[in-house]
Amino acid sequence: MSSGQIALLISFGSLLVAAISLGWNVYRDVIRKPKLVIKLMVGAIIFSKDKHADRVVVTITNFGPGKSIAKMLQLRKTSWWRRLFRQQRFATLVHDYVDGLSGKLPPPLEVGDSVDLTFRFNSDLFLLRDFTHIGISDPFGCVYWCKRSNYRRARKQYKKIAHQTTASNQSLQPTADRSDV
């Protein structure tokens, strides 16, 4: 091999390395976006031995590969036929900004960071409505939806706890004495 052919092989090798490097940088910085994962839980926040508060907790976690911002909670009612006929319903969910136990939106989230948004039990909570998903939007306009099974489980738990709470509240209500009527 002549020195010209060796120089040509080295040039093609360096061109290949530069092309792979450029492709990786474009993929890493432009195509690959951070992923937010949302989970839903129904339970109690325990303050002390005899004090607790029943809450619905929405946990948003950044799984990376970079930092992101959790923007807005969204609700969706969908099924396969609603998607087919474009009949999906959407709503925006505004959480309680006054609640000291709840995180605030929009939080900047580094990789591995999470924020917990809490909702008090009440008769108009989103779990009692006919939505099938809860999601969080990011700065890129992408909405990350909670797993449907997670949403169903939380809805079932909420209805069970709410039913138990109303039943116990009704049993504690004083009944009218019929003897003096």
Image (tube, rainbow, N blue to C red):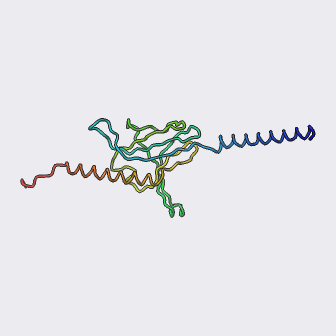
Q: How many marks?
A: 0
Residue 117, position as x, y percentages in the image: 42, 41
- Locate residue 47: give its quadrant: top left
Residue lying at the far front of the rendered structure? 1
Residue lying at the far right of the rendered structure? 2
In the image shown, does 105 or 146 lie closer to the viewer? Answer: 146
- Locate residue 17: give its quadrant: top right
Residue 52, position as x, y percentages in the image: 30, 40
Q: Residue at x 58, y 44 (%)?
A: 140
Give above or below for 162 relative to 115: below
Residue 132, position as x, y percentages in the image: 45, 55
Q: Quadrant of the N terminus?
A: top right
Q: Residue at x 33, y 44 (%)?
A: 54
Q: Residue at x 52, y 45 (%)?
A: 137
Give above or below for 128 relative to 103: below
**Residue 69 in the figure: left or right of residue 169:** right
Give above or below for 21 relative to 168: above
Q: Quadrant of the C terminus?
A: bottom left
Residue 149, position as x, y percentages in the image: 45, 54
**Residue 8 in the figure: left or right of residue 60:** right
Q: Residue at x 44, y 52 (%)?
A: 150
